[in-house]
Image (cartoon, rainbow, N blue to C red):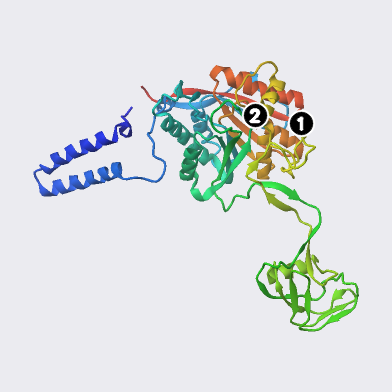
Amino acid sequence: MSTNISRQDREGLLEKISEIRSFIEDAQTEGEKERLLSALSDIERDVSDRKFGLVYEEHREKIEDVLDNHTAVFVEDESAAVLQGGQENLLIEGDNLAALKVLSENYVHQVDVIYIDPPYNTKNKDFVYDDTYVDAGDRFRHSKWVSFMRKRLELAAELLADGGVIFISIDDNEQATLRFLCDELFGEENFVSQLVWEKKRKGSFLSNSITNIKEYILVYTNNLKRFSGLVGQVTRKRETYPCINAVNKRGLRTIPAGVPSNYKDADYFLPEGAIISDKTMNMVLHSDLIISGGVLAQDVVIEGNWRYGQEALDEYAAQGNLYLTRDLYLRRIVEQPRFKMLKDLLSREGDDPECNYKTEIDPENLFACGWGTNEDADEELRQILGGQKKFNYPKPVRLLEKLIASVRRSDALCLDFFAGSGTLGHAVMKLNRLDGGTRRFILCNSNENNICREVTLARLKEVIRQEGYEASLKYYQIEYKMTKSD
C-alpha cells in the first residue's frame, strides 16, 4: 500500500521541496534545469495554495485489497427466503462496498430512490473503519469518514436512474463535509434540499450546550431537469382561481366569445372605455363587452393585471374552464390535480391534531400527520422484535414511508446500503399496500454482531407475517472468488 503523502506535515513537505530545488539548480544542462524547476513549482503551488472545497487524506480500506484480488459474488441462502408472492426484494449480507460493486453490474441507472443512514462519526465509536472503532482520539477521523463515504457514494451515483433521488440522513458532525462531498459527486446544481427532521419530543437538558432535537436529510438528484420534485400534497377537488392579481404587471388580453357569464343579467352591454373595479384592482375595457343569453357574445379586449398570458387564457376558454363572475371579473376553473411541494421542515406533529403515530399516512397529504421521532422508532422496533432494545437509533418507518411517497413513483426501485434495522424495506411494503404500488427494495447490511440476520432479516420476516404483506424476500451473502494469485 502506497504512502499517503498528504498525511505528512505540510511545513516539513515544503522544506523537502526547498532542498530538492537546490539540487535541481545544480543540474548540468539549462534545459533540464528549467523543466525540473517548472514541475517543482507546480507541486509547491499545489501544496501551498489555499483551496476551496473538500480537502482530506485518502485512506485505503482492507476490503479494497480483497477486491483487488477477488471477485465478489452474491450467493443465495434459500433457507432465509420469504415467498409471499408480490414484488421480489433483496437483502444482501456483507460489506456494502463489495455489494455496490456487484450491484453495479446489473443495476446501473435503474435505482429510482436511494435512502441511507450512514454512521454519523460522532466521536462516540459509532463508526467502524477496517474493524476498528473511530473515536475522538483518531487524528484522521474526518478523513477516514470522507474517504469511506466517497467510495460508496461514487458507486451509488452510478446506480441512480436519470432524475432519481438520494436521501442521506446526517447530523451536525459531518453535515458540512457531506454537503461538499455531494456537491462534487452529484453536482452543486443537482442539490434539491437540506431537510430538517425533528427527531425528538425533547432533548437532553444535562448538556451544557444547545439542546439538539433535529437531524438533517440531504437530498440530491443526478439530473435536476428530469427530477419531478418532492410532493407534499395533491389536491384533486374542483377549485377556481382569479385571473387578475393586483401586484402583476398590467397588459391587454383578449377574452374569446363563448365564455359563460355568472352576471345577474343574462343580456348586458358595457361600452369600450368602461372600468370594472373593486377596492384593490380594476380592469379597463378596450372594446365593447356584450353578454347575450348568459355568454360572451363577441371577443372583448381587457386591460388588467393578468396572472396568465394570452395563450393560457385561450386554452382555458377552449376547455370550458374560464368564466365571468357576478362582478364581471374572470376566474379559471381547475379540475386537474395540483401539487404542493414538500416543506423542508419535517415536524414531529402534523396539521391534523387528531393524527398520532398509529394513524395511517395519507400519501396525498403528507402535511396532515407528523414524521415520527426516535422514540417512535424505538417503540416500533421493540413491538416488532419484542424484548430489549436490539438496535441503536433506528429510523421511524413513517419518516421513510413519507419520503418515498413524496417521490410519486409507485413502481420505484429503492436502495439502502446502510440498511440497519431494515426500516426502508418495511416502509416500501407498507406504502405499497396503502396505495397499491409495486415498489421494490434492495437492502445491504454487514453482519457485524449478527445484525443482518437477527435484526434486519428478523424484522422484515416478522412484519411480513404480522402485517400480512404480499412481498417476497431473497437473502444473499457475499463471497469472494480468487481472480489472481497473491
Instruction: Find the residue positioned furthest to the left.
Output: 28
User: In which quarter of the view is residue 209 placed?
Assistant: top right
Q: Residue 374 bears which disc, if any?
A: 2
Q: Residue at x 83, y 71 (%)?
A: 327
Q: Which residue is mark 1?
A: 358
Q: Nearer the viewer, mark 2 or mark 1?
A: 2
Badge 2 amino acid: Asn
Front residue of this view, candidates 46 and 60: 46
The x and y percentages for residue 353 are 78, 39
Q: Could you say which is closer to the camera, residue 232 or residue 445?
A: 232
Quadrant of the snapshot with the C terminus:
top left
**Side of 347 where 72 appears, left or right:** left
**Where in the figure is residue 2, as x and y percent of width and height?**
31, 29
Picture quadrant where residue 88 is located = top right
Residue 78 makes an appearance in the image: no
Indicate the amino acid at tag 1.
Lys
Q: Is residue 272 above or below residue 61?
A: below
Contact? badges 2 and 1 (CB < 8 Å): no
Crowding at dot 1, Cα within 10 Å, few <14 / some 14-19 / many 20+, comes out as few
Residue 124 visible somewhere in the drawing: yes
* Rendering coords of residue 36 (x, y %): 18, 44
Other-residue count near label 2 (Cα within 10 Å), few / some / many at <14 / 14–19 / ≥20: some
Q: Is residue 339 above or below residue 15?
A: below
Q: Earlier in the sequence, mark 2 or mark 1?
A: 1
Above or below, comparing residue 134 to residue 321 in the picture: above
